[in-house]
């Protein structure tokens, strides 16, 4: 149950629209950071939030307040001049905080502007016994986790396709609590996942630690991704054991100067929400939306992704010059769904300030 609750939190956090930063004094490169899975026994983790002073005056961080005693901020205390960078480091202590976490840090400037930064992830608790360290029964084996959460994974693009990524690794631990040995004969995983050992022998009451690498360049896609890793065992009554995996694949953008940001492509979606209102189960309804490049450089739409098979979205063109428009067609077929329906379409682009934007679709199926 904990896994499914955290999976829901993860999907909602991925779908959340990026914080609007236009017409603000400070620009944060990444106001939300997802650690993925954090080991309680490995101690505190931290992330650096870089920001730039976008104004013509010096600015000072007056205060940084955390929402929890487990979160400790540290920041640039000196004045930050026009166009200069500052840093806020947020440390999270996972001790005695098992499960999903979402912590906020409030930043207050000398001009009384308020900014909110977020750190998110999942704490893999340190146990006092094998039962505590391996709380999940999957088949005849016990696992340290039921799901491998990679959090946010950054990728690099070259000629409009994913070229490479910074390798990200998560670890799982497996215990054989049975009287007999169990052999894993084969490990089956998607191309974008690499498990450190394909075959291994787990003797009775023994454990193994496996490393799992995510390599999204093999999948050539962006957005929320989920998959399964299957372990084929020698036990006749429980030959296949499955483990869930999920990640948010995002494009990496280097930190830009104020001038570079002013010249960057910028995606603007006219009316990013639509309500079909009352419709019938057998109805097929559609609408059209305009996407505009309001920036100064060519805009490329990387991907259009809906969160339901009942919602189909197509774009008439994916490359837009400055001020050029594209038309997005959205078709909704409710099928057997009834009641109020909330669906979404995510638009991924090379807009460095808002690389993923959400379109929401609503309908009431009678």
Image (cartoon, rainbow, N blue to C red):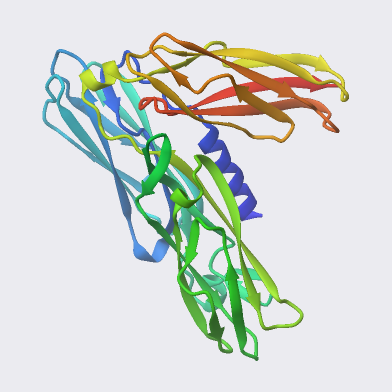
Residue at (36% x, 33% y) in the render: 31
Horizontal side of 72 relative to 321 (left or right) equals: left
Decide: is 188 above or below 166.
below
In the foreground, 266 or 297: 297
Q: Position of residue 202 (x, y in %)?
A: 56, 84
| Residue 255 occupies quadrant | top left
Q: Position of residue 251 (x, y in %)?
A: 40, 37
Tell me where residue 117 appears, x and y as whole percent: 36, 33
Residue 25, quarter of the rendered image: top left
216 relative to 30 in the view: left or right: right
Q: Say which quarter of the image contains residue 260.
A: top left
138 w.r.t. 104: above or below: below
Left or right: 357 as drawn, with respect to 106? right
Looking at the image, can residue 41 be seen? Answer: yes
Q: Residue at x 65, y 91 (%)?
A: 180
In the displayed image of the protein, which residue is found farthest to the top?
323
Q: Is any atom of residue 103 visible in this view? A: no
Asked if 75 appears above or below 231 in the picture, the reply is above
Residue shown at the point (21%, 18%) measured from the top left: 259
In this view, the residue farthest toward the front is 159
Q: Looking at the picture, tell me which residue is in the foreground, 96 or 6.
A: 6
* Front position in the image: 32 or 60: 32
Quarter holding the C terminus is top right
């Amino acid at each position: 149950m904990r896994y499914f609750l955290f999976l829901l939190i993860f999907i909602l956090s991925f779908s959340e629209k990026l914080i609007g930063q236009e017409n603000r004094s400070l620009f944060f490169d990444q106001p939300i950071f997802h650690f993925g899975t954090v080991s309680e026994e490995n101690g505190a983790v931290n992330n650096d939030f870089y920001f730039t002073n976008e104004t013509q005056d010096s600015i000072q961080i007056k205060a940084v307040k955390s929402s929890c005693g487990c979160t400790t901020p540290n920041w640039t205390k000196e004045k930050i001049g026009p166009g200069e960078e500052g840093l806020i480091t947020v440390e999270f202590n996972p001790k005695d905080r098992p499960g999903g976490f979402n912590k906020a840090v409030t930043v207050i400037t000398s001009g009384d502007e308020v900014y909110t930064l977020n750190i998110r992830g999942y704490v893999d608790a340190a146990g006092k016994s094998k039962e505590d360290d391996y709380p999940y029964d999957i088949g005849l084996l016990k696992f340290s986790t039921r799901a491998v959460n990679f959090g946010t994974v950054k990728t690099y693009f070259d000629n409009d396709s994913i070229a490479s990524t910074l390798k990200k690794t998560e670890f799982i631990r497996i215990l054989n609590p049975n009287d007999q040995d169990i052999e894993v004969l084969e490990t089956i995983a998607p191309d974008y996942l690499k498990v450190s050992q394909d075959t291994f022998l787990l003797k009775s009451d023994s454990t193994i630690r496996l490393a799992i690498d995510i390599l999204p360049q093999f999948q050539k896609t962006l957005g929320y991704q989920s998959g399964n890793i299957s372990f084929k065992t020698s036990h006749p009554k429980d030959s296949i054991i499955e483990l869930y995996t999920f990640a948010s694949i995002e494009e990496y953008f280097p930190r830009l100067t104020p001038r570079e940001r002013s010249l960057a492509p910028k995606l603007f979606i006219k009316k990013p929400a639509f309500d079909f209102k009352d419709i019938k189960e057998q109805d097929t309804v559609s609408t059209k939306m305009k996407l505009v490049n309001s920036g100064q450089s060519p805009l490329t739409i990387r991907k259009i992704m809906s969160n339901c098979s009942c919602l189909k979205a197509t774009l008439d063109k994916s490359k837009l010059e400055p001020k050029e428009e594209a038309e997005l067609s959205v078709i909704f077929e409710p099928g057997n769904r009834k009641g109020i329906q909330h669906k979404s379409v995510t638009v991924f682009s090379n807009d460095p300030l808002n690389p993923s934007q959400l379109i929401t679709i609503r309908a009431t199926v009678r």
